Amino acid sequence: MAQFFDPQAKDEESVHRLHAPATERNRAVILELLEACLPRDGVLLEVASGTGEHASFMAPRLKPLLWQPTDIDDRHLTSINAWADHVGSDNLLPARRFNALEDDWHFPDLPAPVSAVAAINLIHIAPWAVAEALMAGAGKVLPPGGILYLYGPYKQHGKHTAPSNAAFEMALKRQDPDWGVRDMELVMDLADAAGFSDLDIVGMPANNFSLIFTKG
């Protein structure tokens, strides 16, 4: 659960910068992968940017690629913009309200075409319909050679990869029975149906995975 970045902060900007502890633990290893696989131009569309910490850390290091953070939560949108103001990077675009389930995956007002889509720690804390919409939307908006990057825990062949992930899924389902650690093979099936032809699977710390799909 996101918490205020600094409960004792006196300035208004700091009060609005939310902090998710997991972000500090995974952002460097995620960035290393993104530096290797992302295109150097266009716009990366981040779906469900949360606190905005990934965007504020990674965007300045991925120039000239533009980074478009999005979310559906007002508090998150405020936090994203507060982090963006804090880092002051000219390739980090203002936060945008975007619902992957309901909104059209068409972005004529962006300063460049979408060349990559990223969703970090999303599909296990959302209904399966969000994973379906994410794959279909990314397949629609990305050009051939475009990259879809997913990060989070996954089952493989229907089984958890670690006891901690099984416990994590139980905790998720207590919050919402439609949430849960997803089967990697089912996610791959969605990607195949959406026109993604290549996949790199990279094991990550804390029993997570990075899935890097390339549009055919």
Image (tube, rainbow, N blue to C red):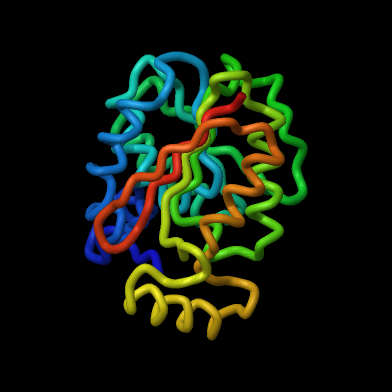
Q: Is residue 189 left or right of residue 39?
A: right
Q: Quadrant of residue 128?
A: bottom right
Q: Nearer the viewer, residue 212 or 20?
A: 212
Which x, y percent locates residue 52?
A: 41, 46
Hey, which residue is sitting farthest front in the picture? 157
Q: Nearer the viewer, residue 60 or 135?
A: 135
Above or below, comparing residue 111 to residue 4 in the picture: above
Q: Nearer the viewer, residue 75 or 32?
A: 32
Q: Quadrant of residue 40?
A: top left
- Tell me the quarter of the image containing the C terminus: top right
Above or below, comparing residue 30 to residue 165 in the picture: above
At horizontal 35% and vertical 30% (from top left) the residue drawn is 59
Number of numbered labels in the structure image: 0
Which x, y percent locates residue 56?
A: 34, 37
Q: Is residue 18 left or right of residue 28?
A: right
Which x, y percent locates residue 141?
A: 67, 28
Above or below, comparing residue 2 to residue 43 in the picture: below
At horizontal 35% and vertical 58% (from top left) the residue drawn is 208
At horizontal 58% and vertical 52% (from top left) the residue drawn is 187
At horizontal 29% and vertical 52% (from top left) the residue drawn is 204
Which x, y percent locates residue 191?
A: 62, 42
- Tell me the quarter of the image containing the N terminus: bottom left
Above or below, comparing residue 96 to residue 176 in the picture: above
Q: Nearer the viewer, residue 188 or 27?
A: 188
